[in-house]
Amino acid sequence: MQRINLLIIISLLTLVPLLETLSSSTLFGLQWSSPLFMDDLRDALVIIKLGGVFLALYLLITNHSKIRDVFAIKWRFNAFLTTHYLLALLQVPFLLLGLLFVVAEPKNDQFHIEKQFTNYTIYARTVDPGAIGKAYHYFYVKCPKPLGFYQLHLIKKIDWLGEFKLKINQNKLVIRSRNNVRSSTNRLDLSKVKPCR
């Protein structure tokens, strides 16, 4: 039984980080506390996943004979070992690259703005890919859910504005922006956004 548990632990340490990395958002789409918190958690998960993969490799290397004893047929043992070594070793460079991005990128809080109004909580996320692409702002209505969860309803995606201020006037989100070139005002109709429930 102890040896079966070892196989389960190795499989979990190898597969869960891979599946979480392949999912499109942090912790399989969990939306808890705030988008900024989830972004910070995503950065911490890179370190946790890397540690889990290294632990899986360590357990594979140090428990070779225990793993072999579980499998009566040699090809199953070889398949288990090969699969888990490959999955773990393939993840290491990608997780190290992710760790490099976590260390090199600016703090997450400059990409997240959340402002509470009387009837709405507005959340703005800035996506700035740097030199390889165009920067955008995504504006959302943030809807509270039980136990600290939330849901986001997209209002609109807007090209880079520079610095901006948010205000709500007559059920419209008013975005006043100023960058080096010009200033502008956008008015987004909140009545067209899916209401919070």
Image (tube, rainbow, N blue to C red):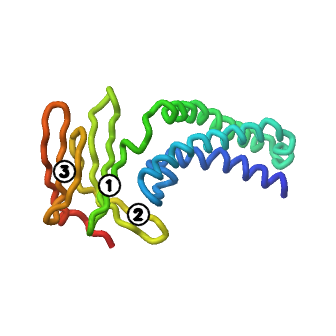
Residue under numbered circle 2:
150
Relative placement, left or right, of 185 versus 140 is left
Q: Position of residue 102 (x, y in %)?
A: 50, 36
Residue under numbered circle 1:
123
Q: Secondary structure at mark 2?
A: strand
Q: Position of residue 145 (x, y in %)?
A: 41, 69
* Amino acid under disc 1: Tyr
Q: Earlier in the sequence, mark 2 or mark 1?
A: 1
Q: Is residue 153 visible?
A: no
- Residue drawn at the location 33% of the way across and 73% of the way down: 197
Q: Badge 1: few (under 14), some or many (20 or more) residues near its Cα, within 10 Å?
A: many
Q: Is residue 182 above or below residue 169?
A: above
Residue under numbered circle 3:
175
Q: Which is more foreground, mark 2 or mark 3?
A: 3
Q: CA distance from mark 3 to mark 1?
A: 12 Å
Q: Position of residue 89 (x, y in %)?
A: 64, 33
Q: Which is more foreground, mark 2 or mark 1?
A: 1
- Residue 159's tag is none
Q: Is residue 1 visible?
A: yes
Residue placed most toward the observer, 77 or 92: 92
